[in-house]
Image: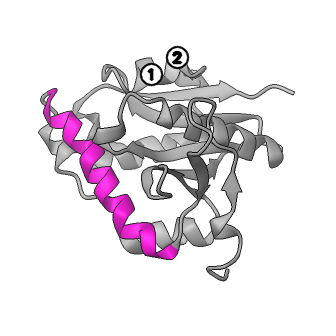
Amino acid sequence: MSDAGPHFAIFPGDAMNPSNSVRFAGPAELERLQHIELSAGRLFAEIGMEEIARDEPFSLSELSEYRDDDRLFVFADDENVPVAYLLVDVVDGCAHIEQVSVHADHAGKKIGRVLIDHVDGWARQRGLAAVTLTTFRDVPWNAPYYQRCGFRILDAGEITPQLRVVRREEARHGLDRWPRVCMRKDLGG
């Protein structure tokens, strides 16, 4: 896709500050997204999860793949500079939030919620029934936060086949040192 194409599409701003917007990421912004992920990750060090804080961000080629497929959304500040981003996949017929990162300087401003709400709309436009994600059960800005956003924790019997594959990969990456859960938000009609 050309850089002048839909990657620069602007979606409505959030209710808190209409000048901010969710949009597709531009090609020159991918390194900025890595910095956002590293900043967000540092918060994990404060709660004893240093390995998570030191984890490498998505590579430029991985981010490019999401960008080229229109599955990488950023939340931009008043100067149109990304301060948060979200990657979305389709897993078992559901939109699956692969990653959502908010720069630590912008945490607590409901920016993640704006991105999640955007993905809800993205999923509805594609006829997907739900949004899923995997996350840490006991980290306040993970599972408890997502529950406030309308997600519920799935029982073992509700975890779909491809979601099980996602969880196996996470375990292989060492994420199961801390309790993790699969979550789902049904979008309804």
Magenta span: helix, strand or loop, mainly? helix
Indicate the quadrant containing the C terminus: top left, top right, bottom left or bottom right. top right
Answer whether residue 41 is magenta in the image.
yes
- x and y, in percent, of residue 67 in the image: 56, 67
Residue 184 lies in quadrant: top right
Q: Mark 2 points at which residue?
A: 148
Q: Which is more toward the observer, 94 or 149?
A: 149
Q: Name the residue under label 1.
A: 145
Residue 82 lies in quadrant: bottom left
- x and y, in percent, of residue 129 in the image: 77, 35
Q: Can residue 107 be seen in this view?
A: yes
Answer whether residue 124 is magenta in the image.
no
Q: Which is more toward the observer, 163 or 149?
A: 149
Q: Residue at x 54, y 32 (%)?
A: 113
- x and y, in percent, of residue 52 in the image: 22, 43
The answer to whether 101 is drawn above or below residue 28 in the figure is above
Residue 175 lies in quadrant: top left
Q: Residue at x 59, y 44 (%)?
A: 96
Q: Residue at x 19, y 44 (%)?
A: 53
Amino acid tagged 2? Arg
In terms of secondary structure, where does tag 1 sit? helix
Direction from residue 147 to residue 106 in the image, left or right: left
